[in-house]
Every structure is written in structure tokens, then in C-alpha cells.
Image: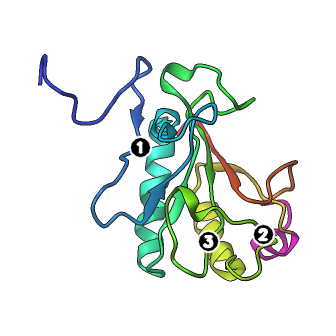
Amino acid sequence: MAGGVPIQPKDSRGYFMLPQAPEDAGYYVYGNVKGVPGTGALAQYAHPNMLSVIFWVEREWQSIDDRKFGIGNISVANGLKYDHASHMKGVEMDIRPVRKDHMVGQAARCSRFDEKVYDREATIRLLCLFLRHPLVTKMYFNDDKVQQACGPGRVKSWPDHNDHIHIEVSERL
């Protein structure tokens, strides 16, 4: 609609912002930019391949689990540098480990060390779904049991990846 309000924010690269609260979605969004509350959406502009992977996994996840998975940083509009050394191309995304208690939102952060709320088995199922998609190229998460369950070399350790999983997809089809 020329001159009207855009249905979905789009940046100069032609990347769309991940839909923030679609009804009955299998994911929720979280995060912030530079520590400012309520700014997570500003870092969720995704390459079309990333959106395709997210929507495919979301559909598959909803068929096996009623919990939502949390999506954090992807990239800021126009690929500008911000508080991440990466996340500028729209093909890198952070997600949270799955929780046992169905909690969602900004406060739903959990670590692989949070035995009362961290659901390792569900996290393995979710990550295996991502790894089934042919566009997924890298995954970082520091839980060695998850790494073993997902297969040799599929999920690797990376500093400070105890409370989120980093997923990358190819820019090419």
C-alpha cells in the first residue's frame, strides 16, 4: 500500500522483520539491542533463507510439541553492526534452549545448567529439526550431551553459548 503503514517492516536489503507475535505461532521473540528493554524486534531482520528455515521448523515443532521456542537476535535493519561480532547478514540467529515449564518471553531465559527448567531432551528434538533442514550450516551450543545426541560435529561449543543456541543458514539456495 503506497504511502500506508507497511504490513511487515522491511529494510533496504529487502529483508523482513520476523513476525513478532503471530497468533498461534510456535515461537516467541526475545532480546534487546544495547541492553535497552523492548528493542529485541530491532535485531530480528532475517534473510529470506532464514525465514524459510524458521517457518519450516516452527511447523514441524508444533506437530510434536506444544511449547514455543524462543528466537532472539538475527540482524538489525540494513545489516549494521551492533552488540554482536556477527549477526549482520540476516543468516545467523540465536534461540533459547527449551524449558520444561512452558514459560515464554523476555524472562524465560535458561541455561544448560538450570536443571529444574532446562529440558535437554526437548532441546535435542528441536535442534535435530533445525539440522534436518538443508540450509542449516552451523550450530553452537555448549551442552556436550546435546552435541553427542545430534551427531558428531553437528553442534559445536563456542564461548558464552550456555544459555542460547547459535544457528546459521546458507545465503545460497
Image spot of residue 124 (x, y percent): 68, 74
Q: Amino acid at mark 2?
A: Arg
- Which colour scheme appears in the figure? rainbow
Front position in the image: 143 or 133? 143
Asked if disc 2 and disc 3 are in contact, CB closer than 8 Å, the reply is no
Relative to 117, 102 lies left or right: left
Q: State the mark number for residue 98.
A: 3
Asked if disc 1 and disc 3 are in contact, CB closer than 8 Å, the reply is no
Q: Residues within 10 Å of mark 2 (few under 14, many from 20)?
A: many
Sequence-wise first label, 1 or 3: 1
Q: In the rendered structure, does residue 128 fall within the stretch colored magenta?
A: no
Q: Amino acid at mark 3?
A: Val
> Residue at 45% of width from left, 46% of height from top?
51
Q: In the rendered structure, does residue 150 fall within the stretch colored magenta?
A: yes
Q: Amino acid at mark 1?
A: Leu
Q: Is residue 47 above or below residue 20?
A: above
Secondary element under disc 2, as helix, strand or loop, is: loop
Most common SS among magenta residues: helix
Sequence-wise first label, 2 or 3: 3
Question: Residue 8 sits in which quadrant?
Answer: top left
Which segment did they paint magenta? 144-154
State the quadrant of the N terminus.
Answer: top left
Relative to 124, 160 lies left or right: right
Q: Is residue 7 above or below residue 72?
A: above
Question: Which residue is label 2 attached to?
Answer: 112
Question: Residue 3 sits in which quadrant?
Answer: top left
- In three-dimensional space, the C-alpha distance between marks 1 and 3, rounded to whole angstroms, equals 20 Å
